[in-house]
Amino acid sequence: MDSLITAAGLALAKGDPLGALKRVALRDDAPALALRGIAMAQLGDFVRAKALLRSAARKFGSAEPLARARCVVAEAEVALASRDLHWAVKRLDTARSTLAAHGDGLNAAHARHLEIRHLLLIGRLDDAEHALSELGAPTLPPASKAVHELMLAGIAMRRLRSSAARAALARAAHAAREASIPALAAEVENALRLLNTPIARLGARGENKLLLLGEVESLLASKALIVDACRYVVRRRLTVITLAKRPVLFALVRALGEAWPADVARDALIARAFRLKLADESHRARLRVEIGRLRRALRPLADVHATKRGFALIPHRAADVVVLARPVEEQHAAVLAFLADGESWSSSALALALATSQRTVQRALDSLAAAGKVQSFGRGRTRRWMTPPPPGFATRLLLPSPLSIA
């Protein structure tokens, strides 16, 4: 491999895409195309990056399976960075096997990390945790170790384990400093900020309070009866009653939980659960039926008592009743939550991550765009959505972890 290719590869490893392009921008041989593709990805031009990496893979051909596999891994990383979650996982798995068979353990581990990140983005935590446990972090170089620890922290945060998340992020920060990759260090700092950002809102006795991750973890371990409006469950410690598929019952128990220890008037419950402004006798009869169903569902944790004007929630052994909700509750809040990571998402990727139809996501995005809360760029299959950047600040230009292709 000639000196220009080596120098360009080293520049990319340090997070210097312009320095790499200065050396290979005018060349169209396979190694140069691959490095140009990675450089364009670090500069944010994902469409051009994919095209260059595919051209490089074709030029390498079957005669150079190792280099071709590296191009496939680089293309998968570009797809992940652009939140194109429909890329061929089987191709990446095949490339990983090829890399491992040819002794390239570093890029094989990187390919596995990409697969795990994909699992995290679509919410398959158990699969991601199992796959991550198979990789040995102590044997990885600093950059890969930082990525490994970031994913451990991501799993811990999603499972509400604040201590484990902080420990993993501390190790990730140390590894990122050793790697001297600015983009990687920035990703670790961003993850650390999440631990100091409210993730939920607590409602109790008519008052509201924003909670951090550690505070939510402590609340779930307490003796309180929790009406969880984030996951649509009612829980006390390890006893969990899910009402995700029973929205009327959850609306009723949330109204009762917000008013506890007071009761809630029948007309107010009808308006909350059935979304009606006026109530007649038929609606009151329906309310009695739904309250009966709610009593049966909550039997392990609480009862619902009738009062003169309505109903009240009576916990069995809990010292308190609280409502745990999202920090911001508005229409299409789930879509906004995914876009809050600052990355650009396709509507199909959002549909996959939210486990809903693409048309539903598109309607939500159109509504949010009309309100000025999201913006899009590109057309057709290349259209991506993101939250508008703060005025006066540049958007992030670098990928989280550059792929070494030297």
Image: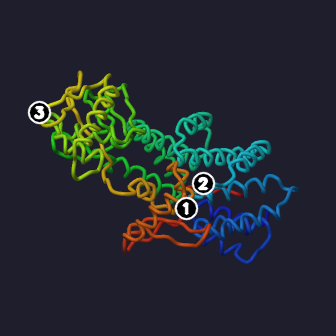
Q: Which residue occupies the foreground of this view, 222 or 403?
A: 222
Query: Of discs 2 and 3, which sits in the foreground?
Result: 3
Of callouts 1 and 2, the N-terminal one: 2
Of callouts 3 and 1, the N-terminal one: 3
Mark 1 lies on residue: 346
Mark 2 lies on residue: 85
The crowd level at tag 1 (other Cα within 10 Å; few <14, some 14-19, many 20+) is: many
Give the position of the N terminus as an image quadrant: bottom right
At which x and y percent is residue 256? 22, 37
The answer to which quarter of the image holds residue 55 is bottom right
Mark 3 lies on residue: 308
The crowd level at tag 2 (other Cα within 10 Å; few <14, some 14-19, many 20+) is: many
Q: Which residue occupies the foreground of this view, 325 or 149?
A: 325
- Amino acid type, label 3: Lys
At which x and y percent is residue 330? 33, 56
SS at badge 1 = loop
At which x and y percent is residue 258? 21, 41
- Amino acid type, label 2: Leu
Identified at 37% across, 29% down, the residue is: 240
SS at badge 2 = loop
Q: Residue furthest front?
A: 281
Instruction: Report the side of 187 relative to 108 (left or right).
Output: left
Q: CA distance from mark 1 to mark 2?
A: 9 Å
Of callouts 2 and 3, the N-terminal one: 2
